[in-house]
């Protein structure tokens, strides 16, 4: 498995990641903006985009999805509770920032808690982590976890927007704390980190029993 971080995209400086298989196929974790740039990077690495895994349905994580689907025919996966944000564009919180909604996507594959998604030899476990949105998820593959806007370096995603819930977020953070091993954390914003580091230094994880 190879992970290629892309430069931060969208007005929110949102992270996204190309995850490549041994067959040189790839999954894109979140698609913030600039489909042309994303496709250019995939081509530079000699890969073929097969699937997009979305951590949630906010505009700054789905902005390039429609264009990428048109260009590649790739499949799109999102938690069932955030599906409407992707398909309708009415709840992607773009208006919260005075921006236009992302382009609507005609079709996506809904996923649920504890699902497994595959690409060639790669297996991604879906960890449902609501709080930032009701359909927020993390994807775990081998020793890597892609946390979207659930967990950041010494911080977490905000819970004060529509569909956010601070108490539910605490439950999700406890779930993350209980995971085994020192996973590499690839978040939706800010720098990469590790689970052990966050258990030790992240005040939100400490508050729910991170140490």
Image (cartoon, grey):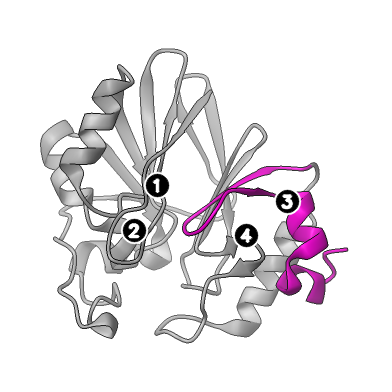
The Cα atoms of the two marked residues, 2 and 1, are separated by 8 Å
Classed neighbour count for the residue bearing mark 3: other residues with Cα under 10 Å, few (<14), some (14–19), many (≥20): many
Where residue 77 sits: x, y (%)?
Answer: 36, 47
- Identify the residue under disc 3: 195
Label 3 with label 1: CB-CB less than 8 Å? no
Q: Is residue 211 left or right of residue 185?
A: right
Q: Give neighbour class at mark 4: few <14, some 14-19, many 20+ (Cα, 10 Å).
A: some
Q: Earlier in the sequence, mark 3 or mark 2?
A: 2
Q: Please tell me whether residue 57 is drawn above or below residue 126 in the rendered image.
A: below
How far separated are the C-alphas under marks 4 and 1? 15 Å
Answer yes or no: do the residues labelled 2 and 1 have beta carbons within 8 Å?
Answer: yes
Magenta part of the chain: 182-211
Mark 1 falls on what kind of element? loop
> Above or below — where is 202 with respect to 163?
above
Asked whether residue 184 is drawn in magenta, I would say: yes
Q: Which of the two labelled residues, at mark 4 and mark 1, occupies the earlier sequence position? A: 1
Q: CA distance from mark 3 to mark 1?
A: 19 Å
Magenta stretch containing residue 177, yes or no? no
Residue at image position (36%, 21%) is 25
Disc 3 to disc 2, how far (Cα)? 22 Å
| Sequence-wise first label, 2 or 1 | 1
Q: Mark 1 sits on what residue?
A: 16
Sooner in the amino-acid sequence: mark 4 or mark 2:
2
Q: Quadrant of the C terminus?
A: bottom right
Locate residue 46, reporting x and y percent.
30, 16
Q: Residues within 10 Å of mark 1 (few under 14, many from 20)?
A: many
Q: On the image, numbered disc 2 is attached to which residue?
A: 61
Residue 149, given in percent of the width and then of the height, sits at 50, 64
What residue is disc 4 on? Answer: 153
Q: CA distance from mark 4 to mark 2?
A: 18 Å
Residue at the (14%, 46%) spot, across then down: 67
């Amino acid at each position: 498995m190879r992970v290629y971080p892309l430069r931060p995209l969208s007005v929110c400086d949102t992270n996204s990641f190309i995850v490549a298989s041994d067959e040189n196929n790839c999954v894109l974790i979140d698609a913030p903006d600039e489909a042309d740039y994303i496709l250019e990077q995939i081509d530079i690495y000699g890969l073929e985009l097969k699937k997009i895994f979305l951590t949630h349905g906010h505009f700054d994580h789905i902005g390039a999805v429609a264009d990428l689907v048109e260009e590649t025919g790739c499949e799109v996966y999102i938690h069932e509770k955030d599906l409407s944000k992707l398909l309708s564009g009415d709840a992607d919180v773009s208006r919260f920032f005075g921006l236009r909604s992302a382009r609507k996507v005609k079709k996506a594959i809904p996923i649920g808690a504890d699902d497994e998604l595959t690409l060639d030899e790669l297996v991604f476990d879906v960890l449902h982590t609501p709080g930032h949105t009701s359909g927020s998820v993390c994807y775990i593959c081998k020793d890597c976890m892609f946390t979207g806007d659930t967990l950041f370096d010494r911080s977490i995603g905000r819970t004060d927007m529509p569909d956010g819930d601070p108490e539910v977020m605490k439950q999700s953070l406890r779930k993350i704390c209980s995971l085994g091993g020192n996973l590499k954390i690839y978040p939706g914003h800010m720098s990469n980190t590790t689970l052990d580091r966050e258990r030790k230094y992240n005040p939100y994880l400490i508050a729910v029993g991170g140490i």
